[in-house]
Amino acid sequence: MTNKLKLIFCSLLVGAAGFAQEVEFTEYELENGLDVILHQDNTAPVVTVGVMYHVGAKDEQPGRSGFAHFFEHLLFEGTENIERGKWFDIVAANGGSNNANTTQDRTYYYETFPSNNLELGLWMESERMLHPVINEIGVETQNEVVKEEKRSRIDNAPYGKIIYATGINKYVFDKHPYKNSVIGTMEDLDAAELDEFKSFFQKYYGPNNATLVVAGDINIQDTKKMIAKYFSEVPKGPEVERVEIEEEPITETIEATEYDSNIQIPAKLFVYRTPSMVDRDAYVLDMISSILTDGKSSRMYKKMVDVEKTALQVLAFPRSQEDYGTYVMGALALGDTPLDTLAVSMDEEIEKLQTELISEKEYQKLQNKFENRFVNSNSSIEGIASSLATYSVLYDDTDLINEEIEIYRNITREDIKRVANQYLQENQRLELDYLPESAKE
């Protein structure tokens, strides 16, 4: 009887978890082109207001790298109705939190408030869209902030060039702007004139290039009225031309060396150019990453860390992007292990994927991992808001918040073998030796 009760209880928990993942939403568009997505969840008195603009580092002009990320900072400076430097104070004084982030493809701003401050969040984001103050003092202030961020996150951070891809993408992309880093160069920002910042805002920050998401403890009809009040009068911006640059396939191994004064342990990396994040094969590559390095039972970890003891750590992960992706594999050398030894071990694991189907047991374990990840993927209102915006802006399919798991469920063992053969070839990759600065001597 006890075991039966436990089984029933577990079944109820699983059913509840699965049900909780069904994210209902309402989506519509204002006359000015602003895409609006609303998700009502009244279980907790909190609400997230987020705006994702379809502009990222890839949209910058040559010689003006870092603009998109710079705006992530600049648009917290203040507006015509929010005093300079007071944005964060207003949010904190009303029990909220806020942040922003930038990628190659989009920029996202959000606030999370107690739900009785929903209107404040909507007003603040409409102010950011309609009345930002872009002046010399704001540009100069944020220039110093961005410089310090670059120093702390990239220049002085161990393996910063790998984490932020500044030491990778320049080799994998020749023509596409993905070759530039999101944070850009300080020389480009220093050289920019104030009018260039104003022009960038006018070009990309119109409502027709944005998606507004409101998620949490809301009433749909009341929220629609508030959105109309604060956003319907925002004038439509110019039509945005999307980047359409095709790269020639990589047909010969690219060999490169990068040095980092902040590390003592060298690393060997393989980097491949892969398809767009919307391509089904990008999902297969995600699964391949899990096979190779997800946890201590993963193939590369067991082989290189546990058995051979040649690697201190291993990694394999896709960087999914709108136009192209990259796939990074690597290992940190243990002791005096030559980097060539690490390369041989990694190639052996790639070859296994290319020549043998993974076992049914490993396949089922893989599916269980992704089912569990799906169940936990939208466990917060902030996470749901971000996911809704991302699927709408970058995938053009908001329904993926509920349906993406079906893509993973339908990936077969044969798909894994095929994709490993199609994308993880030696002549299609960058082979990067990532060394301490002292190795130059």
Image (spheres, rainbow, N blue to C red):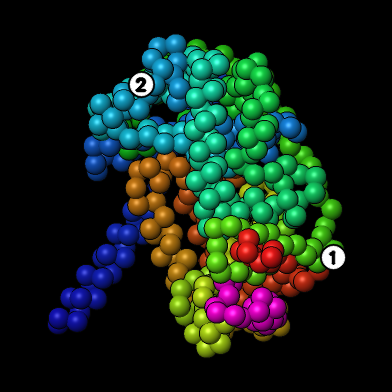
> Within 10 Å of the Cα at label 2, are there few (<14), some (14-19), or many (20+) other Cα atoms?
some
Residue 76 point in image, percent of width and height: 45, 26
Residue 302 point in image, percent of width and height: 51, 83
Say whether disc 1 or disc 2 marks the residue closer to the N-terminus. 2
Which type of secondary structure does the marked residue at label 2 adopt? loop
- Judged left or right of residue 341, residue 145 is left
* Residue depicted at 41% across the width and 36% down the height: 99
- The answer to if 127 sits in the magenta stretch is no
* Residue depicted at 47% across the width and 66% down the height: 370
Mark 2, residue position: 86
The answer to whether residue 317 shows anywhere in this view is: yes
Mark 1, residue position: 252
> Within 10 Å of the Cα at label 1, are there few (<14), some (14-19), or many (20+) other Cα atoms?
few
Which amino acid, by three-letter code, is at mark 1? Glu
Residue 86 point in image, percent of width and height: 36, 21
Task: Tell me the quarter of the image containing the N terminus.
Answer: bottom left
Residue 134 point in image, percent of width and height: 54, 17
Examine the image and state in which quarter residue 255 appears.
Answer: bottom right
Q: As drawn, which residue projects farthest toward the left?
A: 1
Which type of secondary structure does the marked residue at label 1 adopt? loop
- Judged left or right of residue 369, residue 200 is right
Q: As drawn, which residue projects farthest toward the bottom?
A: 307
Q: Main secondary structure of the magenta part?
A: helix
Which amino acid, by three-letter code, is at mark 2? Lys
Examine the image and state in which quarter residue 358 appears.
Answer: bottom right
- Looking at the picture, tell me which residue is in the foreground, 392 or 322: 322
Q: Which residues are magenta?
A: 331-351
- Looking at the picture, tell me which residue is in the foreground, 247 or 276: 247
* Residue depicted at 55% across the width and 66% down the height: 264
- The answer to if 336 sits in the magenta stretch is yes
Q: Is residue 437 above or below residue 156?
A: below
Kindly report the distance in space between the C-alpha atoms of the residues bearing marks 1 and 2.
53 Å
